[in-house]
Image (tube, rainbow, N blue to C red):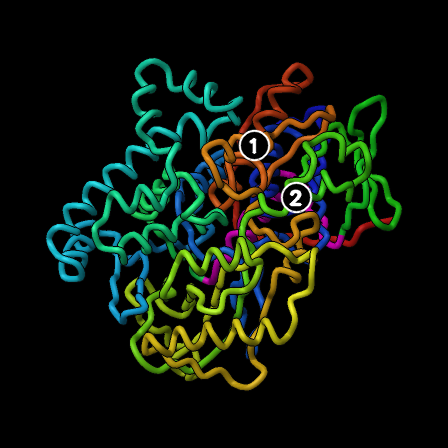
Amino acid sequence: MAQRNSVRTVIVGAGVAGLAAAVRLAAGGAAVTVLEKEGRPGGKLRTALVEGRAVDVGPTVFTLRDVFDDIFAAAGERLDDHLTLERSETIARHVFSDGSRLDLFADAARSEEAIGDFAGARSVAEYRAFCARARDVYETLAPIFMRAERPSGPLGLVARAGPTGLPAILRIGAQTTLWKALSAEFSDPRLRQLFARYATYNGSSPFAAPATLMLIAHVEQEGVWLIEGGMHRLAEALAALAERCGATIRCGADVEAMETRAGRATGVRLAGGEVVPADVVLANCDAGALSDGLFGEAARRAVDPPIQRSERSLSAFTIALAARTEGPDLLRHNVFFSRDYRREFDRILSGRALPDDPTVYVCASDRDGEGALSAEAAQAGTERLFLIINAPADGDFRPFSAEEVERCASAAFSRLAESGLRVAPPPGSMHRSTPSDFARLFPGTGGALYGRASHGSTASFRRPGARTRLKGLYLCGGSAHPGAGLPMAALSGKIASDAILADHASTRASRPAAMPGGMWTRFRPTEPSG
């Protein structure tokens, strides 16, 4: 076991970033306490109970598994000893408003064959060129941006790339939008719409986000993984790993304010009045919760002012249900596209309204990588579905009325029906979440699920880094560098833990040592004292 040092660390929030940091810090010898206001760890990795069955109602796509392999390796363990992962043979099914359908596969040759049948030989050649460009963008940005501390700005990124990397930086497309780049890449408008969807992976519009987001296509091509038991099992496994490393996880512990003395964070105060002292506080929350003053004046001044409403990422309207389906079989991941993509985003971001003809993402969690239905779902006669519809992050500005929500839900099911998929949920069985619900769940966000939108060439550089202006207060999570999504949030936890350990290197009693492996155990939530 790693020897303990003098760095008492309190992590506020047990989302993926906070748990990833807890593992690395505890394995590095720090005394770590994680405080989570909800009844279980996971943050956005949540579940809802529908018809007596748990449905994942947070992130549904698991990529860049090496990021999570590294977290377990930092503790001397293996991810595969605690989670059962299967690489999906399919990436996603895409259904267009004209009734056409295209599946993309883990095997690039299968995808090329499918695109050839769908759109012809010219589109195959365009797809190959696009994949090469997406790979180039990823390989350029991964080591100097995504997996590194936040650069000072575009010039800082160029400096990191060095003389040999400058040509690559210049060709990655940061100065043009994803939609413009795709319009030049693909002659078939349906393929433009398909790959434009990747902008929504970090809550952005393809008509305003930089072309660099095409790298997400390469990330998915490298592997989409299915977690046996559901995505929430990832949070359970990370929480158990953190505890095996010596971290303490306290659920039901609602942090009310940061404690400071002499211009330095000295701990936190819980809603019940208990003070938890610390040398370091790591806030695994949206940066907006700090800048809005939800943790006190000192924390508010530690970060930049709140982002403007127009700068927020997308929110979502989601529906979880267990239903009978009729029509074409689903895969695990399915996208049903609207007729007019530009109009859809204009309505959301300019009109600040739920879409009346939405693109609907459907996660069919009872389907395997080839679309086969689980025996349990087949016996039940219903399958678990989770629908995600893009929405404006206005949850703190206005309520979303029952009438507006009902119209959007009807439009979503109409979109599925027009594509031949009929969904028949039992009455009253749906679990819905609106931007107003997300604003309550994640304070300081207004319902934005991804922090700042990646609109414009410099937006990514304006995400906060791990260090804040208040000594001893650090930041991680999807609103911080390098951005939103499970692997990016986990990387933000690594970057923050590296910064904490580096800043306190002189006080460490010994070099970090790995925690030996052990059997999987569930996290042990404890009630806050005092």
Give the farthest residue toward the bottom: 427
Q: Position of residue 320 (x, y in %)?
A: 52, 70
Q: Quadrant of the N terminus?
A: top right
Local packing at callout 1 (Cα closer than 10 Å; few below 14, some 14-19, many 20+) is some
Report the front residue among 89 and 33: 89
- Which of pointers 2 and 1 indicates the residue nearer the eye? 1
Q: Where is residue 219 in the image (x, y as percent from the top left)?
A: 35, 43
Q: Look at label 1 and name its amino acid.
A: Arg
Residue 296 badge: none
Query: At 45% from the left edge and 36% from the top edge, which residue is drawn?
Result: 70
SS type, badge 2:
loop
Q: Give the range drawn in magenta.
A: 229-252
SS type, badge 1:
helix
Q: In this view, does 399 lie to the left or right of 488?
A: right
Q: Name the residue under label 1.
A: 462
Q: Position of residue 158 (x, y in %)?
A: 41, 19
The image quarter in which residue 32 lies: top right
Query: Is 250 part of what is drawn in magenta?
Result: yes
| 475 is higher (above) or lower (below) than 339 | above
| 391 is higher (above) or lower (below) than 409 | above
Q: Is residue 354 left or right of residue 362?
A: right
Does label 2 or label 1 sit earlier along the sequence? 2
Query: Is 396 part of what is drawn in magenta?
Result: no
Q: Look at label 2 and name its amino acid.
A: Cys
Task: Kindly report the distance in space between the C-alpha atoms of the residues bearing marks 2 and 1.
Answer: 17 Å
Give the farthest residue toward the left: 121
Q: Name the residue under label 2.
A: 285
Query: At 56% from the left edge and 42% from the top edge, which residue is drawn?
Result: 452
Local packing at callout 2 (Cα closer than 10 Å; few below 14, some 14-19, many 20+) is many
Query: At 45% from the left edge and 53% from the top edge, which residue is drawn?
Result: 83
